[in-house]
Amino acid sequence: MTLAASEPEPDLAVVHGGRDAYRDHHPGVGDVALIVEISDTSLDTDRVKARTYGAAGIPEYWIVNLVSRCLEAYTDPSDVGDGGYTTCRVLREGEAVSVVIAGVQCATLPVASLLP
């Protein structure tokens, strides 16, 4: 994935289009629907990344927090100040998260299914 000043390598990126669309270039900001980081020892770093992804306009950013066994779901990107997201929901093992792409709910995942 290519952002204005860097090419981060998230654990998972959900992008628009098929694999063939990116044979000769990385997805750009407008191609990305969701970024997911799996976080154990990198939790502080992954929370800082929320500022970068939010400022770039990535619609949704999840941190699968293995330490606290929860999902941190960041939405509503902001380009004000340091960027980031205006909304962060913490979802626990017994809850579910909606996968929303381009404003359409595509799936619902139990948070427990994202944890080892």
Image: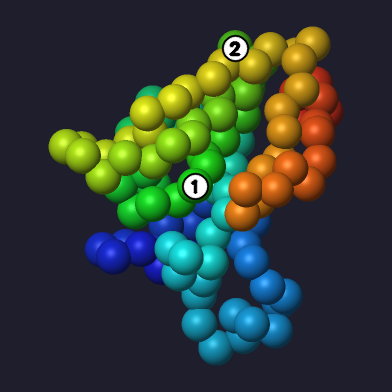
Q: Position of residue 84 (x, y in %)?
A: 33, 36
Q: Quadrant of residue 107?
A: top right
Q: Position of residue 65 (x, y in %)?
A: 58, 23
Mark 2 or 1: in front is: 1
Alpha-carbon neighbours of circle 1 within 10 Å: few (<14), some, or many (≥20)? many
**Front position in the image: 93 or 31:** 31
On the picture, is 106 further left or further right than 102? right
Alpha-carbon neighbours of circle 2 within 10 Å: few (<14), some, or many (≥20)? few
Chosen colour scheme: rainbow
Q: Is residue 10 above or below residue 108?
A: below
- Per the rendering, the mark at residue 41 is none
On the picture, is 39 further left or further right than 46? right
Amino acid bearing label 1:
Pro
Residue 8 seen by the camera = yes
On the picture, is 92 further left or further right than 28? right
Instruction: Tell me the element at label 2.
Output: loop
Q: Which residue corresponds to mark 2?
A: 68
Instruction: Tell me the element at label 1.
Output: loop
Amino acid bearing label 2:
Ser
Residue plotted at (45% across, 51% down): 58
Residue plotted at (47% across, 65% down): 30
Q: Is tag 2's residue or tag 1's residue first in the polypeptide sequence?
A: 1
Q: Is residue 45 above or below residue 66?
A: below
